[in-house]
Image (cartoon, rainbow, N blue to C red):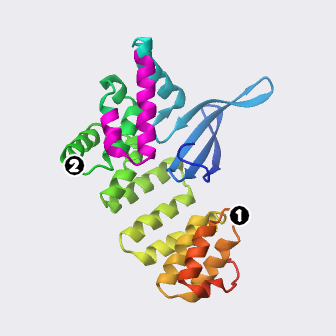
Amino acid sequence: FQVMGPNGTFEKIKIYEKNGLQRVVFRGYGEGGFNYLDMELVRYDGKIGVADIYVYLTGENMSTTMAVLLDKLMNVSPSSDEYLAQRMSSVRTLIKQNNYTEARTQFNYLPASVKTTTAGITLNLQILSRLQDTVSAQELALLEKRYGDQSYFQFQMLDVYNVKKEYDKAIQVINQLDSTIDKDPFLNYYRGLYSYLKGDVTTAINYYEKVTQSNPNFPGAYAELFALNAYKEDKTKAQKYFSAYRKLRNKDPDVIKRFIAAYPYLEEKKSQPN
């Protein structure tokens, strides 16, 4: 839910059966990126409940993540337990504030037993990907060498590849994730983003258009489309997607104001794309 933020989305992707148990996959998307949650469903006392949740970003069940972390914390004194919990909370807050230098300082105070948990590795990656010094680069290389063959680690490396402008590697991660999920058309949005960052505007537009078909209520794809078409001076398409964007419930009024100021012709009403 930290990924989603206040304006994020939580959508059901699929329901399937595994080992005789019903499971449902949800995608969370928001200002912090995206993640997938694969929930194992059980029936108890006539009601449907969740027995456990496999988190794609950590590569393990939520119960396992919490159990391992709790085990590490339980093997210290009560005062140390409180200290570690506060330290972890402090690191997360600093990351949210984009204060990565201080976040690394706070993270380094944690014991090795906590740093090497999935939660610790996740925090460390978030920090190292934003720091440009030699030591951080070396630490990042060591992490990639140690955990690079793990699918969850590759998922977490998306932000690293973005910062390092290694967009082909980022697209490979998206493709692998799509294969693991067994297809989520929404991932075309990220293919579009990385294609644009590579300088391939035509391919980016094609991917965004696919998203408007598969996820018609997702504003991000429309915003990218009217922005790119306005930049290309294709007024017809820019108006078309801008008009569609304005009709969405979760549109951003500030985005609308900015683009009308930059491209006054967008104020004209056009029909929503089919």
The x, y position of residue 81, in whole percent, is: 43, 18
Q: Where's the N terminus, which quadrant?
A: top right
Kind of residue indicated by mark 2: Asp
Taking depth in this image into account, of 121 and 178 the one nearest to the observer is: 121
The x, y position of residue 227, in whole percent, is: 52, 76
The x, y position of residue 274, in whole percent, is: 68, 77
Q: Is residue 263 above or below residue 45?
A: below
Q: Which residue is mark 1?
A: 249
For label 1, count other residues whose C-alpha is less than 10 Å away and answer few (under 14), some (14-19) or many (20+).
few
Q: Which residue is mark 2?
A: 133
Q: Is residue 213 above or below residue 30?
A: below
- Report if residue 71 lies within the magenta region: no
For label 2, count other residues whose C-alpha is less than 10 Å away and answer few (under 14), some (14-19) or many (20+).
few
Relative horizontal placement of residue 266, taking residue 126 as reference (left or right): right
Q: Is residue 7 above or below residue 74?
A: below
Relative horizontal placement of residue 12, taking residue 69 as reference (left or right): right
